[in-house]
Image (cartoon, helix red, strand yellow):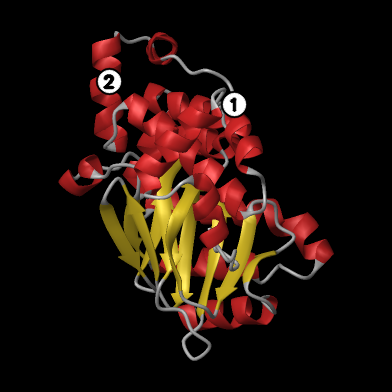
Amino acid sequence: MSKDEVKRVIAAQTKTNGLTETGIQGVQVFRATQAIPCVPAVYEPCVVAIVSGSKEVVLDGQRYVYDGSQYLCCPMSMPVKAGTPSASPETPLYGALISLDRRVMTPLAMEMEHAGNALAATKDSLRAQGIRLARWDQGFTEALLRLLQLAGNQTDVAVLGEARLRELLYAILKGEAGLFARQAFGAGNAIARSIAHVSSNLDVPVSIDDLASRAGMSRAVFHRKFKEVTTMAPIQFVKSMRLNNAAMKIAGGMTVYEAALDVGYVSPSQFSREFKRMYGQSPRRWGEAQQTPVKVS
């Protein structure tokens, strides 16, 4: 089995640009034939696999460019900038997006540990922060192809979808990003749980002291460990998550006022000041400048 076969399956399922549902929960395929510069986005826990073309992601100034040689693993919600700078009608981008559901990943990771399949730590895996690129291996390629081949057949998806998705998630946890992902989904990862809490509660005030308390750490220890995992201080992370979410909402047609309220800002003037400081334009001007081309997560 090869990535060329995966590409043929994805190309057959994507008739338009953007994300296409496969019918398998948490699995989408996508196509892009237009160059899109990096714009604010929020990556929820996911794996993004490219089979043709390349994508670019920026996390806190760190740039990641990946193509068919590597897939991206993002096991925690992260505020990023993402784009498809090289996509064109002549060189289309094709890929797949697989959501990493904590309710599935955590017991699977724990089951692997209990089965004695512990992975040895490497310097690279321990250094990875927020995002990790991993080389395609045979197990990942075969599992992804077998999963995507189910799409379009409702009976196949109903009977085999859950098992084949589990097979792919297992291949990810065994692969080059395996330890990185397993650390994020491990039962003892308090920072990952804090990030999940922030991501789910952007519209309410978030106290760093409350997050530290939830993690069972002092404020100083929480701050240090949080920055080790995300590269950002907790306050910076929360602000980036809110502003990136707001930018996406504005680009999608929501008013500036509605977007500000939706991500927890009580003061529109404070929202405008912080938005302009981060993106170099007022939210209104930034929204007007967006022609809202179809974006791929």
Q: Nearer the viewer, mark 2 or mark 1?
A: 1
- Distance, label 2 to label 1, CA atoms, is 22 Å
Which residue is denoted by mark 2 in the rendering?
223
Quarter-wise, where is residue 273 in the image?
Answer: top left
What is the x, y in percent for residue 183?
A: 36, 35
Identify the amino acid type marked 2.
His
Is label 1 in a helix, a strand or a loop? loop
Identify the amino acid type marked 1.
Asp
What is the x, y in percent for residue 224?
A: 23, 22
Q: Is residue 75 visible?
A: no
Is label 2 in a helix, a strand or a loop? helix
Packing grade of label 1 (10 A; few <14, some 14-19, many >=20) is some
Mark 2 or mark 1: whose residue is earlier in sequence: 1
271 over 123 or under it: above or below:
above
Give the number of the disc on residue 238.
none
What is the x, y in percent for residue 31?
A: 58, 74
Q: Residue furthest bottom?
A: 90
Q: Which residue occupies the foreground of this view, 271 or 108?
A: 271
Q: Residue furthest left?
A: 123
Is the residue under label 1 in contact with that under label 2 (CB below 8 Å)?
no
Quarter-wise, where is residue 104 in the image?
Answer: top right
Packing grade of label 2 (10 A; few <14, some 14-19, many >=20) is many
Q: Is residue 165 visible?
A: yes
Which residue is pictured at 38% across the width and 25% down the height?
Answer: 191
Which residue is pictured at 26% across the width and 24% down the height?
Answer: 225
Which residue is denoted by mark 1 in the rendering?
203
Q: Is residue 263 left or right of residue 78?
A: right
Q: Which residue occupies the foreground of this view, 215 or 254?
A: 254
222 over 200 or under it: above or below:
above
What is the x, y in percent for residue 29?
A: 61, 67
